[in-house]
Image: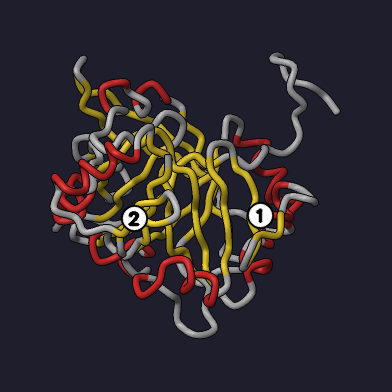
């Protein structure tokens, strides 16, 4: 197999979480306030050339995107209006879009045409256009949300040091949680896309490592046992994205941030759990 100039094989890309999307429709202001109450530092409001708007919370090696729209903006991505609010996207790191096409071919799916867009970014040094190329994949194994590869053409405009320090001490997203009746099938697309032997059996489901994060799919019973009454379970017969885990440098720091923000939480098994009512439909856990 031919190698690139940096010596890496030019085969398919490995499974590496780039970012996650929480869809908030027209409630960006309320969503931003909610996530600030959780102790996250948010970037200034950004506006895509496709008509959507966002605020980000940037970590060391991945990030969370609060995605919605502002009144009067023309939309070129209709799913942003039609998909339900909540955890709505798992996005894969993509240093090479051509290699991402190989991943799709191995998975037996046909991606959309690569989509280029920009978003002006306010930094301490001025306003610049952050540029992206994304490769959207069909939904296979889950009913809501989307998955795609994201190539950052200007990563220096996303991973800014001034945005990477958070009151809750979070350093990275550490877990992404699906829930459904057939956990293995929920992750089947990713198993085909990233290679055989990817999935590991875990209590109540399956999972795999994706750089700094682990992606898991739980049965409805396992999700109920883990999150209790706060479990944002999908409708019967459906599979969807329900939860996020965050790795913090200090649980004490995360606890102090939640208390300062007036956010109720449950402490158990070395985790701080926040219910979906306080995070736009996402079950959130902090671990050290």
Q: Position of residue 193 (x, y in %)?
A: 70, 51
Outermost residue, bottom side? 236
> Residue tagged by mark 1?
190
Q: Position of residue 191 (x, y in %)?
A: 71, 55
Between 121 and 261, which is closer to the camera in this rendering? 261
212 shown above or below 221 = above
83 shown above or below 131 = below
Could you tell me if residue 70 is visible in this image? Answer: no
Taking 72 as reference, is 4 left or right? Answer: right
Between 150 and 22, which is closer to the camera in this rendering? 22
At mark 1, the secondary structure is helix
> Residue tagged by mark 2?
267
Marks 2, 1: nearer the viewer: 2
Q: Quadrant of residue 128?
A: top left
Q: Position of residue 216 (x, y in %)?
A: 58, 57
Question: Which quadrant, please, contains the N terminus?
Answer: top right
Residue in view at x 49 percent, y 53 percent:
176
Between 80 and 284, which is closer to the camera in this rendering? 284
Badge 2 vs badge 1, beta-carbon distance below 8 Å: no
* Few, some or many residues within 10 Å of mark 2 (<14, 14–19, 20+): few
At mark 2, the secondary structure is strand
């Amino acid at each position: 197999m031919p190698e690139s100039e940096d010596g890496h094989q030019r085969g398919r890309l490995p499974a590496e979480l780039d970012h996650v999307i929480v869809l908030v429709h027209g409630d960006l202001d309320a969503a931003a306030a909610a996530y600030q109450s959780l102790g996250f530092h948010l970037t200034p409001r950004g506006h895509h050339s496709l008509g959507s708007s966002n605020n980000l919370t940037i970590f060391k090696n991945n990030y969370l995107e609060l995605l919605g729209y502002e009144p009067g903006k023309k939309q070129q991505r209709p799913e942003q209006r039609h998909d339900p609010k909540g955890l709505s996207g798992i996005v894969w790191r993509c240093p090479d879009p051509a290699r991402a096409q190989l991943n799709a071919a191995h998975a037996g799916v046909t991606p959309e045409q690569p989509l280029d867009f920009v978003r002006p970014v306010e930094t301490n040094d001025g306003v610049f256009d952050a540029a992206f190329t994304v490769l959207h994949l069909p939904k296979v194994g889950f009913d809501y949300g989307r998955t795609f590869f994201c190539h950052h053409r200007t990563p220096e405009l996303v991973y800014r040091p001034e945005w990477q320090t958070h009151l809750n001490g979070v350093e990275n997203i550490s877990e992404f949680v699906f829930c459904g009746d057939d956990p293995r099938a929920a992750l089947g697309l990713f198993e085909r896309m990233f290679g055989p032997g990817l999935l590991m059996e875990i209590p109540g489901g399956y999972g795999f490592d994706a750089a700094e994060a682990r992606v898991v799919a739980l049965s409805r019973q396992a999700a109920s046992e883990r999150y209790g009454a706060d479990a944002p379970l999908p409708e019967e017969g459906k599979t969807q994205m329900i939860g996020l885990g965050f790795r913090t440098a200090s649980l004490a720091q995360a606890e102090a941030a939640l208390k300062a923000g007036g956010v109720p939480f449950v402490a158990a098994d070395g985790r701080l759990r926040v219910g979906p009512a306080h995070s736009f439909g996402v079950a959130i856990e902090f671990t050290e």
